[in-house]
């Protein structure tokens, strides 16, 4: 399936995250062997480094605009593709990581605390992000009475988590995060044209207490569910209002 979301935002991300109960292996040989195997599969991923928090990352050149990345943290393995041409380009990478971690990082079904599939979008805007988000999402709500005043919105980063199954093990989270605002004491943060309003939509699956967790099977289900909800709920009710308000403000 083609990535039609890139036309709606400035950058589109399709990520997966495996959250573990136990700490992941930290031995030098194990870490290097894991990333060498990934690089063998995706030869263009040539940039390897360690961050200050002992997070290891292998990625393609991020300056290309379209790139892959994989990180290994203490209790989390993340895989992402930025601006993929199609969903399958990202899905195949995530599947490969899921197939690899049981053998190279000893992550069994018992060790998986949760599995996340995230669709994310960035919307570039140089003005107040909080005002844009509020105008886009609150105009038809009771909160609108507070917008129709001489004052301005200086803080608004909505987030909502809903259960998608009776047992609560399948959940969806939508969050919209501004990068501008007002610091404590009333000091304004500087507007940065390179900063973007970010929308995150995550389908999280927790293992059941009554059956063995099949990570690959769950991943396929979460991807299907995420695509359906993005098309039916997130794009029409969150993305389009945001892009509409941003377009209006850029014309002013």
Image (cartoon, rainbow, N blue to C red):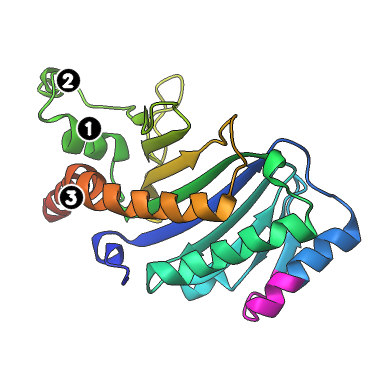
Magenta part of the protein: which range? 37-47
Q: What's the residue at 69%, 75% (across, down)?
A: 39
Q: Percent from the top left, x then y, of residue 135?
A: 17, 35
* Residue at the spot 25% in from the left edge and 27% down from the top edge: 153
Distance (Cα) linking label 2 and label 3: 20 Å
Closer to the observer: label 2 or label 3? 3
Could you tell which of marks 2 and 3 lies nearer the N-terminus?
2
Based on the displayed image, in which of its 4 quarters is residue 42 positioned?
bottom right
Check the picture and name the quadrant holding the N terminus: bottom left
Whether residue 207 appears in magenta in the rendering, the answer is no
The quadrant where residue 210 appears: top right
Left or right, residue 156 beside residue 66: left
Identify the secondary structure beneath mark 2: loop
Question: How far apart in space, not on screen, are marks 2 and 1 (Cα)?
Answer: 9 Å
Residue occupied by mark 3: 240
Q: Which residue is more in the foreground, 110 or 90?
A: 110
Callout 2–callout 1 Cβ contact below 8 Å: yes
Sort mark 1 into few (<14), some (14-19) or many (20+) by Cα contacts within 10 Å. many
User: Looking at the image, which residue sits at the far front?
Assistant: 210
The image position of residue 15, as x and y in percent, is: 49, 55
Name the mark on residue 32: none
Describe residue 200's horizontal placement relative to residue 64 as left or right: left
Query: Which of the two discs, 3 and 1, labels the residue nearer the N terminus?
Result: 1
| Percent of width and height locating residue 55 | 73, 50
Q: Residue at x 36, y 50 (%)?
A: 226
- Residue 167 is left or right of residue 152, and the answer is right
Question: Element under label 3?
Answer: helix
Q: Tell which tag, 3 or 1, sits nearer the viewer.
A: 3
Residue holding disc 1: 134
Q: CA distance from mark 3 to mark 1?
A: 14 Å
Residue named by callout 2: 143
Marks 3 and 1 close (CB-CB < 8 Å): no
């Amino acid at each position: 399936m083609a990535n039609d979301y890139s036309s709606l935002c400035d950058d589109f991300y399709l990520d997966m995250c495996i959250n573990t109960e136990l700490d992941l292996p930290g031995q030098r040989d194990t870490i290097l062997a894991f990333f060498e195997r990934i690089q063998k599969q995706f030869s263009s991923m040539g940039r390897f480094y360690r961050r200050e928090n002992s997070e290891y990352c292998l990625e393609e050149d991020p300056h290309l605009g379209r790139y892959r990345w994989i990180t290994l943290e203490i209790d989390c393995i993340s895989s992402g593709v930025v601006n993929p041409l199609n969903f399958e380009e990202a899905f195949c990478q995530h599947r490969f990581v899921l197939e690899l971690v049981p053998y190279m990082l000893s992550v069994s079904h018992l060790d998986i605390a949760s599995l996340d599939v995230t669709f994310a979008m960035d919307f570039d805007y140089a003005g107040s992000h909080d005002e844009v988000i509020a105008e886009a999402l609150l105009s038809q709500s009771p909160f609108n009475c507070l917008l129709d005043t001489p004052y301005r919105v200086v803080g608004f980063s909505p987030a909502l988590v809903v259960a998608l199954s009776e047992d609560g093990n399948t959940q969806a989270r939508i969050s919209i995060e501004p990068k501008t605002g007002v610091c404590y004491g009333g000091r304004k943060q500087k507007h940065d044209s390179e900063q973007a309003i970010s929308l995150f939509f995550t389908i999280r699956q927790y293992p059941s207490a009554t059956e063995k967790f099949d990570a690959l099977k769950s991943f396929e289900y979460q991807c299907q569910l995420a695509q359906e909800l993005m098309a039916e709920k997130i794009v029409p009710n969150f993305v389009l209002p945001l892009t509409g308000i941003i377009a209006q403000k850029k014309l002013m």
